[in-house]
Image: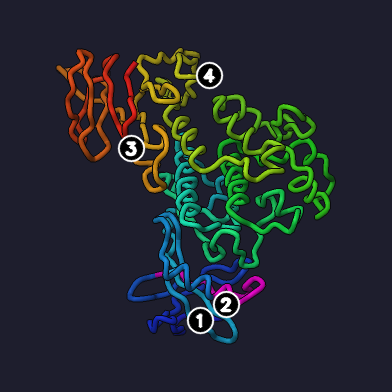
């Protein structure tokens, strides 16, 4: 039952009024209202529970508000209320109506991604946001399918429930949501509390569910359980956690007749994506959190994957295999790869809509990982439509022509796709082959 009614006024500790507009929803920790604050419509979360230490929880929220949001993707706390009846709340931005909870895509499935490429774009934005969060010294501590609001048309992501975010290795009393917690948190091994490394395991679970349509630890063992009890949950997600595609132990492999989607998705995953998941959920990474993939590692493989999905003439998405000619599973036509970008670590297919990002060239800071460098677009040249590369860096880009001449490519300028042309970006060489 809502504690406040429309028109009620609550004071923020900054002295401003917070006016209740309407009740929105109830959650595990409290209620959410639409409010007016500083002349704008916002959301107010009002607590019923605070974890183990209310004063510590309040002070952490206050510090987070003072420090400001680490990234635009977070619905970060903006103002705290005074205490009323031994409780309090905080103000944040409202979720826009065009955004849907991730659970609507992966559990209820009443909202769909318009394409597989769009799903990867969501994975990229989630991963990039957590890279920034972690690099600022925070851990999220409660990463699960209820934390994300997604605009399916744009792939934009908003991350909510940031009230448990705290400096790494500092816990506010919340340890996570079942099925999304890291094994060491589930089993209580050495009384480990959520931290950056447990966040990374939870992030890998989210990425696997989005891309492969199944939980990475739910295979034969999970299917055979008559009723999920705390003891069984500790075995499946904690002490005996086992990846469903572990190459050395197939005792928890997917049951194809009951889990057909994951088998189909896994079949089409490129080898570097499979390797990333195998490493993330390996027995070594389950036992030793320090062996888990970092966000930078995920950004590198996800940007590569996004660029290697092309559209067949029949409209079907094709997952290019090792930047080489690939058969369309729908119509049977062969998609011929005419040109590639030779990068420091691999070659990338050039197709309509290919993007090259900073993180694909090597180390970069947290805010620049997804800064674009090149983008392939169609343009009219000599009366014909031709695929070109567009300089997306926002500054001049050094190019070396096939004859060895050096010229500077202006921002947004188009470059013809010719074998042998090279670019120098962030001291790295990129060559059209």
Tell me whether the residue at label 1 lies in contact with that at label 2, contact meaning CB atoms closer than 8 angstroms: yes
Find residue 427 and report its image quarter.
Answer: top left
Where the N terminus falls, by quadrant?
bottom right
Residue assigned mark 4: 329
Circle nearer the viewer, 2 or 3? 3
Q: Residues within 10 Å of mark 4 (few under 14, many from 20)?
A: few
How many discs mark residues in the rendered view? 4
Separation of disc 3 and disc 4 at Cα? 30 Å
* Above or below 283: residue 75: below
Tell me whether the residue at label 4 lies in contact with that at label 2, contact meaning CB atoms closer than 8 angstroms: no
Find residue 412 and report its image quarter.
Answer: top left
Q: Secondary structure at mark 2?
A: loop
Q: Secondary structure at mark 3?
A: strand
Q: Earlier in the sequence, mark 3 or mark 1?
A: 1
Residue assigned mark 3: 372
Q: Is residue 289 magenta?
A: no
* Disc assigned to residue 5: 1
Separation of disc 3 and disc 1 at Cα? 47 Å
Residue assigned mark 2: 2
Where the C terminus falls, by quadrant?
top left
Relative depth, front residue between 271 and 306: 271
Residue drawn at x 41%, y 55% is: 71
Q: Is residue 55 magenta?
A: yes
């Amino acid at each position: 039952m809502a504690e406040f009614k429309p028109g009620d006024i609550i004071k923020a500790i900054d002295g401003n009024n917070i006016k209740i507009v309407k009740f929105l929803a109830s959650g595990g920790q409290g209620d959410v209202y639409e409010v007016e604050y500083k002349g704008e419509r916002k959301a107010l979360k009002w607590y019923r529970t605070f974890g183990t230490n209310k004063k510590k929880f309040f002070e952490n929220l206050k510090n987070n508000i003072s420090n400001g949001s680490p990234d635009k993707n977070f619905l970060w706390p903006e103002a705290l209320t005074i205490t009323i009846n031994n409780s309090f709340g905080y103000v944040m931005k409202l979720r826009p109506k065009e955004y849907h909870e991730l659970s609507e895509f992966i559990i209820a499935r009443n909202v769909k991604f318009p394409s597989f490429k769009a799903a990867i774009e969501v994975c990229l934005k989630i991963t990039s946001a957590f890279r920034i969060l972690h690099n600022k010294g925070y851990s999220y501590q409660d990463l699960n399918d209820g934390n994300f609001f997604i605009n399916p048309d744009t792939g934009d992501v908003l991350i909510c429930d940031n009230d448990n975010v705290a400096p790494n290795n500092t816990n506010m009393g919340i340890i996570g949501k079942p099925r999304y917690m890291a094994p060491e948190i589930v089993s209580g091994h050495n009384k480990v509390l959520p931290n950056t490394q447990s966040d990374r395991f939870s992030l890998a679970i989210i990425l696997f569910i989005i891309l492969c349509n199944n939980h990475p630890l739910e295979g034969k063992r999970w299917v055979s359980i008559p009723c999920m009890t705390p003891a069984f949950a500790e075995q499946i997600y904690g002490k005996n956690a086992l990846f469903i595609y572990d190459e050395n132990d197939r005792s928890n492999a997917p049951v194809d007749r009951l889990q057909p989607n994951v088998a189909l998705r896994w079949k089409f995953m490129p080898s570097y994506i499979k390797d990333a998941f195998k490493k993330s959920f390996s027995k070594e990474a389950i036992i030793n959190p320090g062996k888990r993939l970092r966000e930078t590692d995920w950004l590198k493989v996800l940007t590569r994957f996004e660029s290697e999905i092309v559209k067949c003439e029949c409209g079907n998405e094709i997952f290019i295999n090792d930047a080489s000619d690939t058969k369309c599973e729908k119509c049977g036509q062969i998609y011929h790869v005419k040109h590639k970008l030779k990068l420091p670590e691999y070659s990338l297919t050039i197709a309509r809509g290919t993007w090259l990002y900073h993180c694909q060239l090597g180390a970069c800071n947290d805010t620049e990982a997804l800064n674009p460098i090149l983008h392939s677009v169609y343009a009219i040249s000599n009366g014909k439509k031709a695929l070109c590369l567009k300089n997306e860096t926002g500054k001049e880009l050094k190019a070396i022509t096939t004859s060895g001449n050096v010229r500077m490519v202006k921002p947004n300028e188009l470059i013809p796709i010719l074998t042998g042309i090279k670019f120098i970006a962030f001291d790295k060489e990129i060559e059209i082959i």
